[in-house]
Image: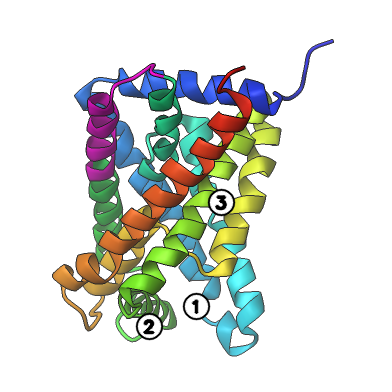
Amino acid sequence: MDKKMLSPTEITTATINAGIKKASLSTARMLLLGIFAGMFIGFGAHADITVMQTLGSFDVGIAKFMGAAVFPVGLMLVLVAGAELFTGNNLMTMALMDKKITINKMLKNWILVYLGNFIGSILLALIIEKAGLYGQGSNIANKAIAIAEAKVGLSFGQAFLRAILCNIIVVLAVWFSSASKQVIGKIFAIWFPIMMFVLSGFEHSIANMFFISLGKLLGGSFSWVEMWTSNLIPVTLGNILGGAVIVPVVYYIVYKENN
């Protein structure tokens, strides 16, 4: 009888093998697939804003839930259609711990994929802004600006801590998805955790590349430098701690080391 899902030990092996494949991608593939991932996550973020634009005046909790409900399509596209996402690729540390890849290859992947994610995110933000989907003074434009300004307004510590929690959940969604051999199983495995992190108000560096860039293009009262210093830098560092250290180190110790 064919197994419908992998055990945690089998997921560990699959994650290590995935890390080996990611480390061996060419520079062009890392960049191109990174651009796609940035756009895919941006699609989910755009849907999130669209759903929430006026619901907040009715009920904040329902507005957050409805926005969170549509956001996961971004990671579904990344994992099922195929793309390279920096936060998910933080799990490559498992292959590093298993001595299957070098730190230089891992860092090359992270840097190029992160760059590609940023290009894809800001490119989508530019296209959506130029397409007139966020008219000046409209509810959706005001919501996008408010989201961006709130993110930039976080303290370094707040952004960092929210980012740790975020990428713990994101890499667990990737881990959870790896357990399923069927597309529908992967979709459910992705939807619940990602919906939860968005609903909870945690911070995702790649999503924020889109959210904050779009808010700035629409007239947000912050600078491009502040986008990085006040949000993307602390959030990226927190994402790395949550997704590249906490989850993979514990699971490697439990399911791989000495097995």
Q: Residues within 10 Å of mark 2 (few under 14, many from 20)?
A: some
Magenta stretch contains residue 106: yes
Residue 54 lies, in percent from the top left, at 54, 82
What SS does tag 1 mark?
loop
The type of residue carrying mark 3 is Ile
Residue at position x 53%, y 57% in the image? 71
Residue at position x 26%, y 60% in the image? 233
The type of residue carrying mark 1 is Gln
Residue of label 3:
169
Residue of label 1:
53
Residue 193 lies, in percent from the top left, at 62, 52
Query: Which of the marked residues, 2 or 1, is nearer the chain's N terminus?
Result: 1
Determine whether 5 is above or below 76 in the image.
Answer: above
Q: Do the residues labelled 2 and 1 touch (CB within 8 Å)?
A: yes
Residue at position x 41%, y 46% in the image? 40
Residue 139 lies, in percent from the top left, at 43, 83
Q: What range is drawn magenta here?
A: 99-115
- State which mark lies toward you, 3 or 1: 3
Residue of label 2:
142
Give the position of the C terminus as an image quadrant.
Answer: top right
Q: How crowded is mark 1: few (under 14 residues within 10 Å), some or many (20 or more)?
A: some
Outermost bottom residue: 57
- State which mark lies toward you, 2 or 3: 3
Question: What secondary structure prevails in the magenta region?
Answer: helix
Separation of disc 2 and disc 3 at Cα?
29 Å
What SS does tag 2 mark?
helix
Determine whether 173 is above or below 219 in the image.
Answer: above
| Residue 203 visible from this viewpoint | no
